[in-house]
Amino acid sequence: MRRHVLTKAATALSPIGWATLLSWAGLSSAAQAQSLDILADFRIDRPSATDGFVTVRERPQPLYNPVPMRLGSVEVMPRVSAQALYDSNIFVVSDAEDDAALHLTAAAEATQSAGNTSLAADALIDRRQYLENDEQSTTDYWLGAAVRHALRRDSHVLGALRIGRETESLADPSVPLNTVRPSQYDFVTGSLGAGRTFNRLLVAARASVDDRSYKDGLDALGNPIEQNFRNRLLAIGEIAAEYDFGPRRSVFAQASFNRRDYRNQEGPEPIRDSSGYRVEAGASFMLTPLIRSRVSAGYFRQDFKDPLFESVSGLAVRGRFDYLVTPLVTLTLTGSRGVEESSTIGTGAYVADRVGVQADYELLRNLIVTATTSYERDRFEGLDRRYSIKRATVSAQYRLSPRLRLDAEYEGRDQDSVGTSPGRDFVRHQLTIGLTIQGI
């Protein structure tokens, strides 16, 4: 699935900034909400557990931050980007076929603050046009809005709504194997949450819904593949609490509960309805003055309505370590373990273990070079299939001015599949070069 990251604006709203409010409007999937730290949306006027710790990516760059347009009391941040893309394996198969594409994006973000209420809205259209294989071309779009209201200094409520269309990459482990065209789905998502601070204790809760309707796929002979068995409504409830022991250490606990209701059934395949939960506890602290950490561990479980699908349970883990090697170099280590839903016939879910390392180097004040490597292992329940996925990327972001930015990225992916029911086995290389114009 494409992951869209909204641009942080230079000017902060009161009582919150662009990034916090738009992170709610920016949830294209309620499932992604489970992976976010909901407590971060309500840490307003509280001392941070890592106050004063700034990574290369977090460091302010006032000389190169884009400047929004002002329309009365409304700030608008327009953005247009054009990229040239080369893909060595567009069908993600062992017998690779390459192609090139033009990737165009137009987006705008608008914010307004009035008293205790902050409003945000954003819109995006994203076109990827392949030169030789037009059936791989896609158009994504969304329209979203979010609101934050301060009931009092220590109490806030947040709400967001988004509608649009997104595309899943053929490389996604949850995509059906017999399709050769990226899967698209229309979605409607909504979130509503609240948080309150009691001296050193912060408590927050959030409810999210995500409704998806999938478009037909396409097999190797050009025949349509029905994907309406994937249409579903996902509902998630979350609650979390964090206690600060001091400016650089805290403990927290959080729990999420989900329910998936599918609208259609594919032939003899049982209905995929399920419900589950994830509970975990952890801590944020400075391991040393140069190492920031946030780790948690707990338990997850997903139960299916039909007994033909096996229940999934196990150890839940999430963690992140940021190491300031020098003022110009930051190393970041991340890891996670959890359950993901699957659209493969014969199984309803798989367990994903992920670990990654990223290095950010501020070569110049306006030039950041990044290298990442990651490993993912996916184990499907009720089906003898296991994935080993290795990725590596090298990218550069060069800010020519507040309005202009050059980007370049290379990504390599090596995916192996084993078992009596193997999945996609392939190697792919992608190279992207682009220009972004934003602000005024």
Image (cartoon, rainbow, N blue to C red):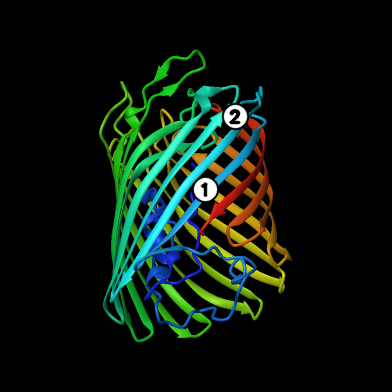
- Residue 61 spot, x, y in % from top left: 61, 70
Q: Which residue is mark 2?
A: 92
Horizontally, residue 359 falls left or right of residue 294, namely: right
What residue occupies the far top of the structure in this picture?
Answer: 221
Query: In this rendering, is residue 362 above or below 168?
Result: below
Q: Quadrant of residue 71?
A: bottom left
Q: Residues within 10 Å of mark 2 (few under 14, many from 20)?
A: many
The residue depicted at 30 percent of the width and 38 percent of the height is: 232
- Residue 80, numbered circle: 1
The image quarter containing residue 214 is top left
Whole-number angstrom distance, CA of label 2 to CA of label 1: 29 Å
Q: Residue at x 67, y 46 (%)?
A: 409
- In this view, the residue in front, 257 or 27, is 27
Asked whether residue 169 appears in the rendered view, the answer is no
Q: Position of residue 243 (x, y in %)?
A: 41, 80
Question: Which callout, 2 or 1, points at the residue further toward the start of the chain?
Answer: 1
Three-letter code, disc 2: Val
| Percent of width and height locating residue 200 | 38, 85
Between 62 and 299, which is closer to the camera in this rendering?
Answer: 62
Residue 221 appears anywhere in the view: yes
The amino acid type, in three-letter code, at marker 1 is: Val
Q: Residue at x 60, y 54 (%)?
A: 355
**In the rendered image of this protein, does residue 356 appear above or below residue 142?**
below
Of labels 2 and 1, the one closer to you: 1
